[in-house]
Amino acid sequence: MQTDDQSHDISPFKGKTGVRRLINAFGYSLEGFKAAFKHEDAFRQEVFLAVVMIPLAVYLGTDETEKALMIASVILVMIVELLNSAIEAAVDHTSTDHHALAKRAKDIGSAAVFLALTTVALVWGLMLTN
């Protein structure tokens, strides 16, 4: 088992605790949002859709549960897109050469985004046909 001192040797970011860790984590998250918005067309498109769909969910949902499910399904797409973009960036950082495992990783990430988008269609379809 590693002590805090040992984990700090592995990464200078691992030694932070308490409020400092929370502040750092918040800053890293903001940087991630900015990077995704700047570099990822799909994420930008999904943010613009969310800006439209979340207020629509509040307006069209008949109760708080429907509204929450509709909003959560939209947010889920953005979460999965962020993870997919992170996978793609990590794979591309490792090598931009064509490799079967790199393709598999990217295809699986894409499939996850597809399932999240399918979830939006399913949730919204069920809620709006009630």
Image: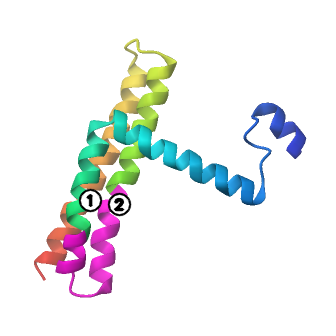
Query: What is the x, y in percent for residue 96?
Result: 41, 15
Q: Residues within 10 Å of mark 1 (few under 14, many from 20)?
A: some
Q: Residue 72, relative to residue 78: is it above or below?
A: below
> Taking the image as drawn, is residue 1 in sight?
no
Q: Is residue 94 above or below residue 41?
A: above
* Residue 96 versus residue 76 in the image, above or below: above
Report the magenta residues as a range: 55-76
Query: Which residue is at 31% across, 39% downward?
Result: 110
Cα gap from disc 1 to disc 2, whole angstroms: 7 Å
The residue pinned by badge 1 equals 50
Q: Is residue 74 left or right of residue 89?
A: left
Residue on which disc 2 sits = 75
Q: Amino acid at mark 1?
A: Ala
Quadrant location, the N terminus: top right
Give the colour scheme shown: rainbow
Where residue 34 appears, as percent x and y from the top left, is 43, 42
Q: Are marks 1 and 2 in contact (CB under 8 Å)?
A: yes
Q: How many marks?
A: 2
Expressed as whole percent of the image width and height from the top left, the position of residue 79 reads: 40, 53
In the image, which disc is placed on residue 115?
Answer: none
Label 2 sits on what residue type?
A: Ile
Q: Is residue 130 magenta?
A: no
Q: Position of residue 13 (x, y in %)?
A: 72, 40
- Does residue 121 lie above or below 82 as drawn? below
Which residue: 89% across, 45% down? 3
